[in-house]
Image (cartoon, rainbow, N blue to C red):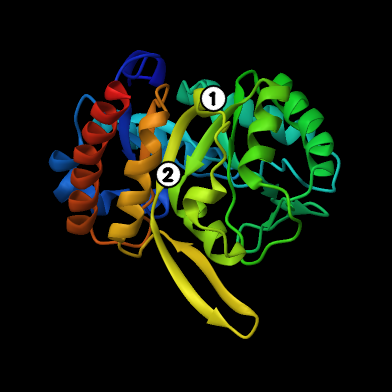
Amino acid sequence: MRTVTEAAPPGGPPLVAFSWDMTTEHDRLAPYAGQLTGADRAFMVGPYARDMTTIDEALRFCDQYDLVPLLHTLDLDLCGLDPIDETLVKQLGVAARRLGVEWVTTDLAMWTKDGEALVEALVPMPWIADAVDYVVPRVERMQELLGVRVAVENSSYAYVIGDANPFTLQSEIVVRADAVMVYDVGHHLIASTVSGISTDDLMPADYAWDRVVESHLSGVTVLTAEDGPTADDQHAAPISEELWQLARRHLPEARGLRAMVAESEGIRGEDLVAKVGRLAAEVEIWRADGAAR
């Protein structure tokens, strides 16, 4: 099985990756595997830290279809109020070494409370400057325990608390903690929708694009509530042209991008093939635009 270090070294083209439903259901992908594999293809596994069964299945799946594994954990609690569960983080470090990943991705959010996972109701970090001082030492300690870097992802928001710029806060955290970063395109659109700030105005000129190693793209559903619009990223929803264009405007800046992930839980195999194919074509456009800038 190839690792991200071997398949996507710094300075080279990024991997084109996808996520899928529960790992035990991956055999449903068998009829489409030939259209999803290739030298630049990867699979993103999303386990709980203690779920070694999912890691085992992901290793089998990636080895069977020659896919490079990526790791997006569901309970690495960057912004939580609970003390860091060092045993849990060390277990995740074991999984990271088994998968051969260089970083572990997680949203800038509270993933657990009183030891219980909040995967269906995670609490994103508020847009306040004081949050940075709280999160930075947690990221630093987690990286020590993991043995690899944390890739801090801009989170999804149903509503906004605070008036600081979320991308500025994300950048400051990763620079101070010497971490790396994930830019989620759909989460960018969601933050714009719920804040009422345009996507381009929300993205600061000094965003730490040099720290972005991974990016995610999935569909977004916008809802109308009494207090204004809200939105949610839906991995099964189609990616709108607005999202593709948002990615085209910003991803050429991510010159160190090493993996681009189509988050795709809940979609049919033939739709996944089309989605990954479009993503691969878009990556070539972004790389050409980035080289021309």
Q: Residues within 10 Å of mark 1 (few under 14, many from 20)?
A: many
Q: Quadrant of the N terminus?
A: top left
Report the amino acid beneath label 2.
His
Q: Residue beneath label 1, please?
A: 211
Residue 66 location, x and y as percent? 25, 28
Q: Residue beneath label 2, please?
A: 216
> Foreground residue, 69 or 206?
206
Report the amino acid beneath label 1.
Arg
Q: Residue at x 29, y 21 (%)?
A: 291
Query: Secondary structure beneath disc 2?
Result: strand
Q: Quadrant of the C terminus?
A: top left
Q: Earlier in the sequence, mark 2 or mark 1?
A: 1
Regarding residue 108, the answer to whether it shows in the image is yes
Task: Check the image and report above or below for 261 versus 190.
Answer: above
The answer to whether mark 2 and mark 1 are in CB contact below 8 A is no
Residue 160 location, x and y as percent? 68, 62
Residue 9 location, x and y as percent? 37, 14
Task: Check the image and report above or below for 288 versus 228.
Answer: above
Task: Check the image and report above or below for 184 versus 162.
Answer: above
Query: Secondary structure beneath disc 1?
Result: helix
Q: Residue at x 49, y 40 (%)?
A: 183
- Per the rendering, the mark at residue 49 is none
